[in-house]
Image: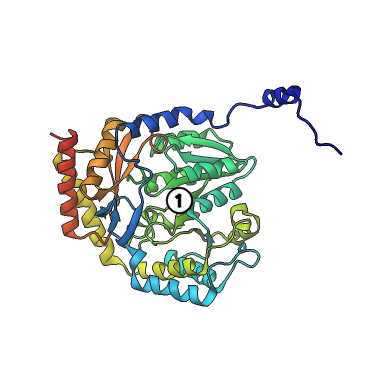
């Protein structure tokens, strides 16, 4: 036997069948990013925290930095009871389940976590997912199928859009927070079709809240079911901390509530709660639930402990609201343009004119010891650039004062304020 020899004709044929580089579609973004880095600024999306000292402080670039760019709204990541619950579960149940919830992946802790959610939200059912993204992906794509309609706010989170695209339902968008447009678009749909209206309690880019009472009334008028994503509302809206839908009094009219553990709860994971009598069948038909390994025992233990503590966190909620109102007013007084006229949530968006100014402001703040999120299209609407501040119940009065001082100094250095 002799080795095959590749002929020149074979080499030509191999080169002929090569298609275009599949990464070519990203060339413009790669060039834009490189041009930005060539100016000497740090990469806003490649920050490494070498040490995290508390919910509000970390070491970044070797210096103590106040964290104003996390979703750790209630500061539960370092709560002693939460940490102890995770350590105990790690010792008793090991590092992971290596299985789906419908196979070997349901441990005692998963049921305890779902029980904590049912107690917190006052519902008959709760279903825990491995992430909040998967909760939206799974629930939306499963309950709205072929011949049904999903009606969603144009500014909906990416996980909501992806949940729509994963399923076979028709997708209808309405203008952000427009009750009138929602009513008009629902009115055009077949009366006998299944309809799911998807809303968010708090919209994560600008920190504005949805007019839920008016929207729920419109949805009910047209016979639609309602899903509210309370990822950024759980923990500090409402008397019990359930979210904007509780705060605005529409608990009895909402069919499904989606949430996450990666914000106020302080760990990772997602969930859906509901009072629908047939809800439990979703455990058998929801693909992102059935075909994903379950959360590690330590994670669901920390989540359950945190959720139960959030039931009695009235003082923390009050302090968080005080922080939000003070920072919002302070930034306005300094001359910054904000995403909302008043403090509507724990998110405050500082609006800036272009990407270069936004990056320079972001870096100036980081150099002064303050970390915030930089947001740009496609995460924001076209032509919209902002710095997103996420407050925490553990931010002290002194830290809020320091934050305002850093914004004033950085804003004057960059030329954002006079």
Horizontally, residue 144 falls left or right of residue 317, namely right
Horizontally, residue 335 falls left or right of residue 58, namely left
In the image, 147 versus 287, the foreground residue is 287
Q: Quadrant of the C terminus?
A: top left
Q: How many marks?
A: 1
Task: Locate residue 292, reporting x and y percent.
Answer: 60, 57
Task: Locate residue 363, reporting x and y percent.
Answer: 26, 41
On screen, residue 9 above or below 253 = above
On screen, residue 308 above or below 26 = below
- Which secondary structure lies at badge 1? strand
Task: Locate residue 157, reporting x and y percent.
Answer: 44, 43
Residue positioned 34% across, 46% down in the render: 209
Horizontally, residue 388 falls left or right of residue 32, namely left
Q: Disc 1 designates what residue?
A: 228
Task: Locate residue 60, reporting x and y percent.
Answer: 29, 52
Q: Quadrant of the N terminus?
A: top right
Residue positioned 42% across, 35% down in the render: 378
Residue 206 appearing in the image: no
On screen, residue 352 above or below 88 = above
Disc 1 crowd rating (10 Å Cα; few below 14, some 14-19, many 20+) is: many
Q: Where on the picture, by quarter, is residue 417?
A: top left
Residue positioned 39% across, 70% down in the render: 82
Residue positioned 58% across, 29% down in the render: 21
On screen, residue 256 above or below 2 = below
Residue 295 appearing in the image: yes
């Amino acid at each position: 036997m002799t080795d095959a020899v590749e002929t020149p004709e074979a080499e030509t044929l191999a080169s002929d069948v090569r298609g275009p580089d599949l990464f070519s579609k990203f060339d413009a973004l790669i060039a834009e990013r490189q041009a930005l880095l060539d100016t000497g600024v740090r990469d806003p999306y490649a920050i490494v925290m070498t040490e995290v000292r508390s919910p509000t402080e970390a070491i970044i670039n070797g210096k103590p930095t106040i964290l104003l760019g996390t979703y750790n709204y209630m500061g539960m990541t370092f709560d002693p009871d939460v940490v102890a619950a995770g350590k105990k579960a790690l010792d008793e149940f090991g590092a992971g389940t290596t299985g789906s919830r419908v196979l070997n992946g349901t441990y005692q802790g998963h049921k305890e976590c779902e029980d904590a959610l049912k107690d917190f939200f006052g519902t008959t059912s709760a279903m825990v997912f491995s992430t909040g993204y998967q909760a939206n992906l799974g629930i939306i794509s499963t309950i709205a199928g072929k011949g049904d309609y999903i009606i969603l706010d144009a500014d909906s989170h990416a996980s909501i859009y992806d949940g729509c695209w994963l399923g076979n339902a028709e997708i209808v968008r309405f203008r952000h927070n427009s009750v009138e447009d929602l009513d008009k678009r629902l009115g055009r749909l077949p009366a006998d079709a299944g309809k799911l209206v998807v809303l968010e309690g708090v919209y994560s880019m600008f920190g504005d809240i949805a007019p839920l009472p008016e929207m729920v009334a419109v949805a009910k008028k047209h016979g639609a079911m309602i899903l509210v994503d309370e990822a950024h509302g759980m923990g500090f809206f409402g008397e019990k901390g359930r979210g904007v839908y509780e705060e605005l009094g529409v608990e009895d009219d909402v069919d499904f509530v989606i949430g996450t553990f990666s914000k106020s709860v302080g760990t990772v994971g997602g969930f859906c709660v509901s009072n629908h009598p047939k809800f439990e069948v979703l455990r058998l038909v929801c693909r992102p639930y059935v075909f994903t390994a379950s959360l590690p025992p330590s994670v669901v233990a920390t989540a359950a402990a945190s959720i139960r503590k959030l039931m009695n966190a009235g003082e923390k909620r009050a302090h968080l609201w005080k922080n939000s109102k003070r920072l919002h007013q302070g930034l306005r007084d300094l001359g910054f343009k904000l995403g909302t006229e008043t403090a509507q949530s724990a998110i405050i968006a500082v609006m800036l004119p272009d990407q270069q100014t936004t990056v320079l402001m972001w870096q100036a703040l980081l150099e002064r010891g303050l970390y915030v999120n930089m947001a740009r299209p496609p995460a924001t609407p076209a032509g919209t650039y902002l710095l997103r501040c996420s407050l925490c119940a553990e931010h002290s009065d002194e830290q809020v004062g320091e934050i305002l001082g850093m914004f004033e100094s950085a804003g004057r250095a960059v030329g954002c304020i006079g």
